Structures are given as structure tokens and as C-alpha cells.
Image (cartoon, rainbow, N blue to C red):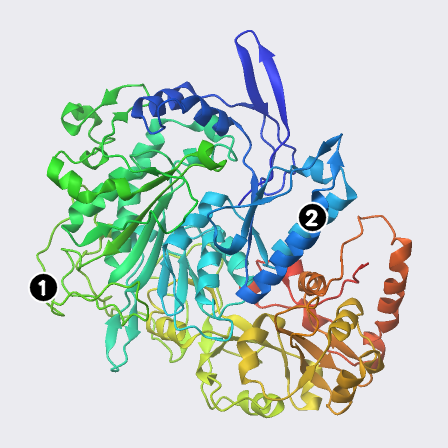
């Protein structure tokens, strides 16, 4: 998460000037405030000066940048067409207006695009919250950022954190594993890349996002759910021993799932984050890296084991320390015996400034003792310091590793945090794997050809991992999970439930099961008839979260994720998956269908719906999104006539771009609604209403608490009040239908749940 620059103050003492930062107690994204922390750590300075990572003559600039607050960075998310609309709104409205603002006699510096991020979809600014509050215009900009962030269209994300997904070269058919995914900003990028073609509701690929911390998994769910994708699954495992998964192959056999792309963003000491995580200044020692090195290797080894031949794994840390960076990569390359190679990513992000990886480094203890190689380490230190922490001693082997292809981003080069990233390509099976993992046929020229000299099933020599680096006690050569033991819980068909207690300790919230419906489930006929679903609608991809009683919500996943879930219910702890497409509505039964459409899943469902659609204009959408329950007569004539011919119940409100009106949205919009007896309403969450209204050129903002509406807003307020007839005419579903969510959504904030009960203020 990116936090806007804090307020700074200078404290002068007899030694000299030191930069001290004070955080407010309720700082956005930080929780409780820090006490004053002096931004100084002599051990840190001595360590990095001696290593020589920073170019000669730049160390003072490096340290000065580390002491400066980190600029706020935002990334425009979502599908491409909507992203362009948001970018257009930012550039042509907010950024232009900001350039004219003066605070305390000084002009405000407008946000600037990150030069290396494609299509100007990432921006950074030095404006603090204090400055944002000093101008009504800037306050509107701040509200815009907050609102669009809540609706998933903008992400506050540190600039360097955006780099790894860009280097993975994601395509819509890729199977992707994010090993240490929370809080989920990189995961969101991966999902967006899968959905690069907005016309394909179910890409062939998917993202499995994992985190070891159960509570952080729900942060991950919150991030992922904003993108409304049927191709994301959140799981809760230790990444160093994440289980191998089985899938049904095209020939009807059982096979092992190998991933086309893996993101291995491992836990690290985080000294590259000192600009935003101020407490790192006082907590940093070299011991942090020594303690994490082994875990980082175990996670990375587990990653390359599950990578398909020809696939790419991106290893990254927010640490500058070679013990966590080049030492881990060198260990992987050495153990792989040529199965892995470092890819040259130097041309993948033009405009990004980075330093090549190093081939020589030393190790320092927290007491300041230096060691150049393993032979110098005393025996009593052998438990803390391991041979893999040093550079390889074989110069030829070291040269062949090409560690200079690693990328280290230094804070003072482009005003960012510190970061390390390396791209690994798997050329052959790992030497300790016994069977050859096939990569599915690639659909892009960027993918590597299959090696022909390694026949499927050919045993390879077993190479033991040294010093306890074997993952999770599981045999590294295991290619398929073991069959359930006698006495394990019997697996029900079409159910991905919690794993048996024998096999996995459970922590955190107990999740409801994921129950897939059969094609002949009685819930389908009324839905198919009411919405006139096309024959190719994939009913077997629909699931619910309960075994018994009425189904409250229906969700959808892609067929590939369904394959994974049904074959691995005893191996995985699934936290959340699927996008909600229908919700039960008790009023709907009398109109022929007990399920209304859910806005979250409308882009997934829309290609299969052939009725219950009303084509609306820009003016119609403005009415529907600013009035809670307007009469049908408020719509323009075309939409009014369509609505009059339609029976009561759930509907789709469809907008298509008008090329003759360049000022209108140039992307399609689908909204869920309800056709009542005499009125109509949009079932759109509050923040999405804000988003769509801004796309239509309507400026929307919230009144501050305790303040009444301004004069120019009264007309809109009156219109909203006039339309609020929900309780009087039963035109729409009861309010409780908007409040309730199943267990899978309980951990989200209330304003993420569907239902637009709040009146909007617009000008």
C-alpha cells in the first residue's frame, strides 16, 4: 500500500540536523501513529557503503532519498476500456485544475506519469493530505481518489511494487500462482492482465493467490473482489510447502498442475521500504536478512518445482540486501544444474532506471564483523550463517549464472522505494524431479519451445537439498499428491469442502463449503427461462456456499478453476473464489424468477443473457444513478417504451457508445436494475455509482459529516427524495436483500456490499 507523504519537521541538536517524522494517530493506511523516529542507522550506512551497491559519488544522494517521504503513487486498474475513461477524466479534469491551484503562494505540482509504466496508467505525486485539505478543489480530487479506490478502479500502490507483474508477460491463457500474495496489489495486476480482452468473460487462465497468514488472506480477498473476476482463487498455505495440485487432463487422465507463470514476492527485511515504513530505521540489523535467507530459498525452490518447463518465475523483494537477493538467485541456479536461467529483462520496461545485479558481496553480523566467504565463518556461527549466503567460489560457474541480469532499483534514481527483481525461465525439469512436467501449448511467440530431449516420465537423478532446505518435509521428487488415507473424510461429488483435520491444521475463520451445482439442478429452469440464457451457458461452473436450505447467492468460476477445486478439496484451504452472479430475491418468485442479477457478475453473465435488457442513454443513466427509484416516465422515450413492454423483475441496463457524441463514455456499460410496477431502479453499489457518474461527466462528491447540502445541490436532493417509494409500492426487492451477504463476503467493509441506499450529491 502507498501512503501519502507525512508531515515533516526539523529537530536541531548539538550534533547537527536530523530529519524526524511525526505521524498523526489516524494516518491513512498506517493504523496507530508512530512516536518520533530519528531517521538514522549507522550500521545500515556502514553496511551498504562497504558493499558498494550504490554508484560511486551517489551515496549521499541515496541516503538523502531514503530519508525523504515516499511519493504517493496510484495505478489505474480495471479492464482496458474503463481504464482509458478514468485516465481521460484524471488528465482532462483533475490534473488540469490542480495546475492552477496555489497553496500558501506556491503552485501545486501536478501528478506525473511513471515513465516506464505502459499507457500512462500509473502516476505519482508529492501532495500530502495536509495540502489536499487546504483547497476545496484538491479535496474533490482526494474524494475522487478514495471513491475510485474503493470501487476498484484505482489502486494506491508503491511504484516499484508494480514492476514484477509487468515482467511476467501475462497472457489470458496462463495458469498463474502468486505465492506470497497479500495484501494483493500485485495480484490485482495479474487479474487485470488475464482480462485484457474485455469481450472474453472466461479467460482460459487463472490466478491462484496464496498467503500463509489467514487474516491477511482477507485483505487479499478484498483486493481481488473489487475486480469481479471468475478466474481468481485465494488459498491459505505456507508457501514453502504449498501442495501440488491435481487436475483432469484433456485425455481424461489425472495430471499434476504446473504453472505457466509464478510470482515469488517473498517475505523480506524490507529495508527498501524505509521511506514509508519508518520503524525500519530503528529495527534494521543484518540479522534480519540472515534469518530470512533460508525461508526465501525454500519458497523459491517450491516455486520452481511447480513451474512448467518454458514458464517464467519472477523473484522479488523490497530489500536491497544481496543475502536476500543475489544469494538466493545464485543458490537456485546452482541447484538447478542448468534447468533454470536468468532472463534478460533490460528492454522490457523502457524508462526504468535500475542497477545490474552484483557478483561479489560480503556478509556482516549485527556486531559489525565481516566475512568474505564460508571458510572464514567460525563454527559457533554455522547455525546462523550458511554457505548459500556467499557468492559461488567457482568463477566459471559464477560467470555462467549472469547475475548481472538481476535488477536492483535504488530510491534516488527515480524517487521510488528500493527493490530487487529477477526473472527466471525454466529450461528443463529440476534435477530432483522424477517426471517431466509438460507446459501446455503456448499461444504466443514469447513462450519457449518444449525441450525434445527429455521424454515424459524419464527418471532424473535425485539431488538432495542441503541444510534442511527440502520443502516442508515433502519429498522433492513427488509429482502427484498422495491418495487420501483410510479414515479420511469421504469426498462428496461437486463439493470443494474444508480439508480433513488429519491432513491440515486449521487456523482462522471456518469457511463454508464450495458446492458446484449439477446441470439438472432445479434452480436453473426458471433462471434460464426468465433471462433467456443462451444454450452455451456453462451451468456446471455455477456454485453456492451451502449444502442445505435455500441457496442465497450463486457464484461462477471458470471451468479451469472448477477443475482445480474438484480435484483438490483435501489438499487446499480455499478462502474465497468466484464472482457473485445472482442473489435470491423473495419478491422475484411471483414474477417468474427468484434470483436477481448481481452487479459484481454482470460482465461475466452478460454475454449469455438474451432478454430482460433495456438500452439506455447517457441521460437515462444519470437519472437512474442519482435517483433512488425514479418513475418510468423519467426515462427518455426509447428506454421508456422498452421498459413499458417488460414485466416486473430484474433487468440489465445497457449503454453503448455513441460515436457522434465524443464527450460521452466511449466504452460499453452494463448495470443491474429492477423493473417495478411504475418505477425502475439501478442495483449498483454506492462507489460504483460515483464511478459511472464521473464517466458521464457528472461531478459527484460527498458532503462532510454534519454539513447540509449546498444550494446548487438541492434540486438533485429533491429528485432523489421524490423517487424513494420503495417501501410504498413494493416495486423493488426488500432492503434486506441488499444488506445480506454470505460468509465469503462477511470480512469486507460494509460499503463494498451491494445496494445503493445512499443519496448522491452531484453538480
Question: Which percent across, then down, holds residue 629?
Answer: 80, 74
Q: Which residue is mark 2?
A: 96
Q: Which residue is mark 1?
A: 459
Q: Evaluate whether residue 490 shows in this view.
A: yes
In terms of sequence position, does the residue under pointer 2 or pointer 1 come before the other? 2
Compared with residue 183, is residue 467 higher up or lower down, i.e. above or below?
above
Residue located 40% across and 67% down the image: 206
Rate crowding at label 1 as few (under 14), some (14 to 19) or many (20 or more) other CA atoms within 10 Å.
some
Q: Is residue 534 left or right of residue 395?
A: right
Rate crowding at label 2 as few (under 14), some (14 to 19) or many (20 or more) other CA atoms within 10 Å.
few
**Residue placed furthest toward the top:** 14
The image quadrant where one finds the C terminus is bottom right
Q: How many marks?
A: 2
Do the CB atoms of the residues marked 2 and 1 lie less than 8 Å apart? Answer: no
Select label 2 or label 1 by which is in front.
2
Q: Evaluate whether residue 79 shows in this view.
A: no
Quick one: SS at disc 1?
A: loop
Specify the quadrant of the image occupied by residue 641.
Answer: bottom right
Compared with residue 604, is residue 154 higher up or lower down, i.e. above or below?
above
Give the numbered dot on residue 256: none
Question: Which percent across, then down, holds residue 285?
Answer: 37, 26
Specify the quadrant of the image occupied by residue 730.
Answer: bottom right
Residue located 45% across and 86% down the image: 518
The one nearer the camera, 354 or 550, is: 354
Q: Is residue 400 left or right of residue 481?
A: left
Quick one: SS at disc 2?
A: helix
Q: Is residue 560 left or right of residue 141?
A: left
The one nearer the camera, 715 or 266, is: 715
Residue located 68% across and 60% down the image: 687
For marks 2 and 1, give the CA distance.
Answer: 64 Å
Question: Which percent across, then down, holds residue 357?
Answer: 29, 38
Amino acid at each position: 500500500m502507498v501512503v501519502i507523504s507525512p508531515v515533516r519537521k526539523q529537530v536541531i541538536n548539538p550534533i547537527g540536523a536530523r530529519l524526524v517524522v511525526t505521524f498523526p494517530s489516524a494516518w491513512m493506511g498506517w493504523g496507530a501513529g508512530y512516536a518520533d523516529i530519528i531517521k538514522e542507522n549507522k550500521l545500515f550506512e556502514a553496511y551498504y557503503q562497504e558493499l558498494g551497491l550504490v554508484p560511486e559519488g551517489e551515496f549521499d544522494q541515496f541516503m538523502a532519498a531514503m530519508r525523504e517521504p515516499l511519493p504517493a503513487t496510484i495505478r489505474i486498474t480495471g479492464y482496458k476500456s474503463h481504464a482509458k475513461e478514468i485516465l481521460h477524466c484524471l488528465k482532462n479534469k483533475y490534473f488540469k485544475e490542480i495546475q492552477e491551484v496555489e497553496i500558501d503562494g506556491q503552485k501545486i505540482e501536478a501528478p506525473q506519469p511513471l515513465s516506464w509504466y505502459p499507457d500512462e496508467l500509473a502516476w505519482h505525486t508529492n501532495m500530502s493530505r495536509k495540502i489536499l485539505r487546504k483547497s476545496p478543489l484538491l479535496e474533490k480530487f482526494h474524494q475522487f481518489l478514495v471513491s475510485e479506490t474503493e470501487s476498484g478502479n484505482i489502486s494506491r500502490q508503491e511504484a516499484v511494487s508494480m514492476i514484477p507483474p509487468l515482467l511476467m508477460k501475462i497472457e489470458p491463457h496462463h495458469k498463474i500462482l502468486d505465492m506470497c500474495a497479500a495484501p494483493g496489489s500485485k495480484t490485482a495486476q495479474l487479474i487485470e492482465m488475464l482480462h485484457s480482452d474485455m469481450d472474453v468473460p472466461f479467460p482460459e487462465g487463472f490466478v491462484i493467490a496464496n498467503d500463509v497468514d489467514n487474516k491477511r488472506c482477507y485483505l487479499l480477498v478484498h483486493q481481488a473482489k473489487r475486480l469481479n473476476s471468475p478466474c481468481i482463487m485465494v488459498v491459505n498455505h505456507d508457501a514453502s510447502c504449498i501442495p501440488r495440485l491435481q487436475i483432469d487432463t484433456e485425455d481424461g487422465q489425472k495430471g499434476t498442475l504446473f504453472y505457466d507463470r509464478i510470482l515469488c514476492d517473498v517475505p523480506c527485511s524490507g529495508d527498501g521500504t524505509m521511506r514509508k515504513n519508518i520503524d525500519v530505521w530503528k529495527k534494521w540489523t543484518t540479522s534480519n536478512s540472515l534469518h530470512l535467507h533460508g525461508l526465501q530459498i525454500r519458497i523459491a525452490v517450491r516455486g520452481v518445482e511447480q513451474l512448467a518447463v518454458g514458464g517464467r518465475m519472477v523473484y522479488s523483494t523490497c530489500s536491497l540486501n544481496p543475502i536476500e537477493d543475489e544469494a538466493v538467485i545464485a543458490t537456485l541456479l546452482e541447484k538447478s544444474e542448468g534447468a533454470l536461467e536468468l532472463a534478460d529483462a533490460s528492454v522490457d520496461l523502457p524508462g526504468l532506471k535500475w542497477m545490474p545485479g552484483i557478483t561479489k558481496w560480503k556478509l556482516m553480523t549485527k556486531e559489525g564483523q565481516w566475512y568474505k566467504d564460508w571458510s572464514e565463518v567460525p563454527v559457533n556461527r554455522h547455525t546462523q550463517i550458511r554457505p548459500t549466503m556467499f557468492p559461488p567460489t567457482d568463477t566459471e560457474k559464477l560467470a555462467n549464472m549472469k547475475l548481472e541480469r538481476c535488477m536492483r532499483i535504488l530510491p534516488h534514481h527515480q524517487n521510488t522505494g528500493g527493490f530487487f527483481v529477477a526473472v527466471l525461465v525454466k529450461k528443463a525439469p529440476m534435477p530432483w524431479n522424477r517426471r517431466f512436467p509438460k507446459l501446455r501449448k503456448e499461444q504466443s511467440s514469447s513462450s519457449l519451445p518444449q525441450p525434445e530431449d527429455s521424454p515424459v516420465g524419464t527418471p532424473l537423478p535425485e539431488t538432495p537439498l542441503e541444510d534442511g532446505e527440502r520443502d516442508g518435509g515433502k519429498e522433492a521428487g513427488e509429482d502427484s499428491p498422495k491418495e487420501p488415507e483410510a479414515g479420511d473424510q469421504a469426498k462428496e461429488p461437486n463439493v470443494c469442502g474444508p480439508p480433513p483435520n488429519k491432513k491440515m491444521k486449521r487456523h482462522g475463520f471456518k469457511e463454508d463449503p464450495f458446492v458446484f451445482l449439477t446441470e439438472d439442478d432445479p434452480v436453473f429452469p426458471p433462471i434460464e427461462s426468465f433471462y433467456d440464457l443462451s444454450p452455451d451457458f456453462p451451468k456446471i461452473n455455477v456454485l453456492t456456499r451451502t449444502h442445505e436450505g435455500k441457496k442465497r447467492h450463486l457464484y461462477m468460476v471458470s471451468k479451469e478453476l472448477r477443475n482445480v477445486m474438484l480435484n483438490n478439496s483435501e489438499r487446499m484451504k480455499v478462502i474465497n473464489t468466484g464472482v457473485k452472479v445472482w442473489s435470491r430475491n423473495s419478491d422475484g418468485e411471483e414474477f417468474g424468477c427468484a434470483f436477481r442479477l448481481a452487479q459484481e457478475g454482470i460482465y461475466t453473465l452478460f454475454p449469455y443473457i438474451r432478454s430482460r435488457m433495456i438500452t439506455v442513454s447517457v441521460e437515462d443513466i444519470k437519472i437512474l444513478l442519482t435517483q433512488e427509484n425514479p418513475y418510468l416516465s423519467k426515462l427518455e422515450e426509447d428506454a421508456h417504451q422498452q421498459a413499458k413492454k417488460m414485466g416486473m423483475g430484474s433487468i440489465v441496463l445497457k449503454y453503448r457508445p455513441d460515436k457522434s457524441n465524443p464527450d460521452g463514455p466511449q466504452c460499453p456499460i452494463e448495470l443491474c436494475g429492477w423493473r417495478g410496477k411504475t418505477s425502475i431502479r439501478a442495483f449498483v453499489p454506492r462507489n460504483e455509482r460515483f464511478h459511472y457518474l464521473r464517466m458521464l461527466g457528472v461531478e459527484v462528491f460527498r458532503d462532510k459529516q454534519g454539513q447540509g447540502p449546498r444550494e446548487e445541490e438541492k434540486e438533485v436532493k429533491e429528485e432523489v427524495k421524490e423517487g424513494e417509494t420503495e417501501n410504498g409500492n413494493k416495486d423493488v426487492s426488500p432492503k434486506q436483500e441488499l444488506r445480506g451477504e454470505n460468509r465469503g463476503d462477511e470480512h469486507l467493509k460494509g460499503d463494498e456490499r451491494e445496494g445503493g441506499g445512499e443519496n448522491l450529491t452531484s453538480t
